[in-house]
Image (cartoon, grey):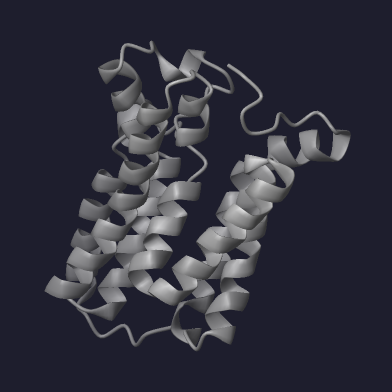
């Protein structure tokens, strides 16, 4: 972990602003912009890109993916530029929590995979690329979005150590634990053989 030298008040302000950015539900925004209806009443009800894809609109899903990843990455980059590395990690965690528990939606948010990957890319791009590669490899091989996310999450702390970014290992472990927590239902369906595959339909 980095040394936390920044004043607690500044870190608190960083956390608040990053949380509010992370809480923006871009999946719902894109669904409405493309006339797809209320995303929370479609498919799994999740507000992320995978559920947007279930509507059949690939462009809306792609934009949701980029924007959800971007809000995590942007929070990290701005905090790093304006304050420092300790603030960057605080911002990454806060933006991630904002996506999971958005104040704008009564604290019922998404599962955080895109935001997780975007945050990692901004914190340490080699680790982020390795985690993205893990997600993509599993998705292409097995076509389970949830399993791809789980393996990418659990691999992130390992990649951080292997690639020489030990300062983010603790944060990676925390983010991975939250992803597993948010995927409890998916884990149950995977074990029961009832988890839908990517591209299985609306």
Q: Is residue 118 left or right of residue 19?
A: right
Q: Is residue 58 left or right of residue 20?
A: right
Q: Is residue 151 left or right of residue 127?
A: right
Q: Quadrant of the N terminus?
A: bottom left
Residue 195 x %, y % = 75, 32
Residue 130 x %, y % = 53, 69
Which residue is nearer to you in this view: 150 or 200?
A: 200
Looking at this rendering, what residue extends furthest in the left direction?
Answer: 82
Asked which quadrant contains residue 94, the reply is bottom left
Q: Residue at x 50, y 48 (%)?
A: 113
Residue 158 x %, y % = 62, 76
Which residue is nearer to you in this view: 126 or 160?
A: 126
Asked which quadrant contains residue 145, the reply is top right
Q: Quadrant of the C terminus?
A: top right
Which residue is nearer to you in this view: 90 or 168?
A: 168
Looking at this rendering, what residue extends furthest in the right direction?
Answer: 192
Q: Residue at x 40, y 41 (%)?
A: 65
Query: What is the tally of numbered marks visible in this picture?
Result: 0
Q: Residue at x 47, y 67 (%)?
A: 129
Residue 79 x %, y % = 20, 67
Asked which quadrant contains residue 29, the reply is top left
Q: Is residue 101 above or below residue 33?
A: below
Query: Is residue 9 shown to the viewer in this render?
Result: no
Q: Is residue 93 above or below residue 179?
A: below
Q: Is residue 56 above or below residue 169?
A: above
Q: Is residue 136 left or right of residue 101?
A: right
Query: Is residue 87 shown to the viewer in this render?
Result: yes
Q: Residue at x 54, y 64 (%)?
A: 131
């Amino acid at each position: 972990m980095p040394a936390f030298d920044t004043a607690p008040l500044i870190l608190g302000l960083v956390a608040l602003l990053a949380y509010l950015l992370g809480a923006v539900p871009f999946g719902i925004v894109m669904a409405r912009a493309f006339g797809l209806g209320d995303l929370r009443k479609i498919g799994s009800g999740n507000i992320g890109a995978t559920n947007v894809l279930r509507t059949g609109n690939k462009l809306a899903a792609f934009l949701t993916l980029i924007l959800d990843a971007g809000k995590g990455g942007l929070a990290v980059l701005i905090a790093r530029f304006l304050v420092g590395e300790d603030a960057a990690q605080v911002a990454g965690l806060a933006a991630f929590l904002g996506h999971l528990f958005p104040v704008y939606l009564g604290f019922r948010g998404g599962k955080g995979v895109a935001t997780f990957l975007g945050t990692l890319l901004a914190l340490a791009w080699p680790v982020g690329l390795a985690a993205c590669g893990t997600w993509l490899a599993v998705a292409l091989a097995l076509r389970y979005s949830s399993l791809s996310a789980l393996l990418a999450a659990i691999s992130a702390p390992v990649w951080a150590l292997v690639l020489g970014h030990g300062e983010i290992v603790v944060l990676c472990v925390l983010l991975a634990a939250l992803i597993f927590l948010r995927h409890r239902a998916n884990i149950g369906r995977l074990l029961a053989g009832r988890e839908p595959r990517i591209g299985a339909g609306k």
